[in-house]
Amino acid sequence: MKIGVLALQGDFDLHRKALARIGVPSVEVRKAAQLDGVSGLVIPGGESTTLLKLMDAWDFVPALETFHAAGRPIFGTCAGLILLAREVERPAQFSLGFIDIAAERNAYGRQRESFETELEADLGQGSVRFKAVFIRAPRIRRLGAAVRPLAELGGECVMARQGSVLVAAFHPELTEDPTVHQYFAAMVRTATTAHGIGANLAAGGGDRGAI
């Protein structure tokens, strides 16, 4: 099992370090063809409109649609959440629509209003608490019926899942707490077993590295 981290913009290196701390191999993904060599994908925080332009330039959207349709897990943090949402507000922009939520950009304030807090979530084995950093974070304004809220802040959902798609309004990679990355790694491990992704990679995928 290998997890890819989209390395077009944002703090992709910190996600790789977080995965390394829990013993999960990862690789930077800079070209769409590299998606063939990974079992799951992290879309990191950054600036969503810039990420969209870079994804368009490298023809990532069709490849991501194929990746998602194959049941391979995708985890979007902050700007990654915006890109995965069904709807984006204030202002509206294109998004992939892989999870049935409406996201409002930069809803938690400016850069100087960033903060760290502790969240509580039920991730399948009882309630757990973990640290989370919010930096110009998006707000989840609407949850579809098929979306499961996992963590809340002030009565509002800040982490959610629909099938193979996980989103977080915060930056788990900015803390030493492994909880969220462990949860996503477990999603990838389960999907790899269920869909035979590991066998497919062994036959023709593998580690293509960053190009």
Image (cartoon, helix red, strand yellow):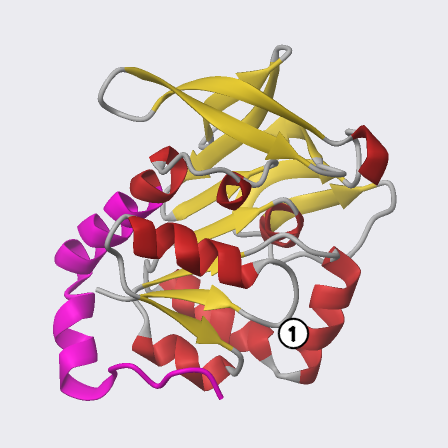
Q: Is residue 201 magenta?
A: yes
For the point 40% across and 76% down, the residue is 35
For the point 64% across and 11% down, the residue is 154
Q: Observer-nearest residue: 189 or 13?
A: 13
Q: Main secondary structure of the magenta part?
A: helix
Residue 142 location (% of width, % of height):
65, 28
Where disc 1 sits, the SS reads helix
Task: Say whether residue 203 is visible.
Answer: yes
Number of numbered discs overlaid on the protein picture: 1
On screen, residue 90 versus residue 186, left or right, reads right
Q: Observer-nearest residue: 21 or 53?
A: 21
Q: Quadrant of residue 127?
A: top left
Q: Is residue 54 magenta?
A: no
Residue 167 location (% of width, % of height):
51, 41
Q: Is residue 11 above or below residue 209?
A: above
For the point 49% across and 69% down, the residue is 64
Give the amino acid type for the residue marked by disc 1 in the picture.
Answer: Met
Local packing at callout 1 (Cα closer than 10 Å; few below 14, some 14-19, many 20+) is some
Magenta segment boundaries in residue numbering:
184-211
On screen, residue 107 versus residue 54, left or right, reads right
Task: Say whether residue 110 is visible.
Answer: no
For the point 52% across and 83% down, the residue is 31
On screen, residue 31 versus residue 37, left or right, reads right
Q: Quadrant of residue 108?
A: top right
Which residue matches tag 1? 55
Q: Is residue 81 above or below residue 112?
A: below
Q: Is residue 98 above or below residue 178?
A: below
Quarter placement of the N terminus: bottom left
Residue 51 location (% of width, % of height):
70, 66
Q: Quadrant of residue 61?
A: bottom right
Residue 197 location (% of width, % of height):
20, 67
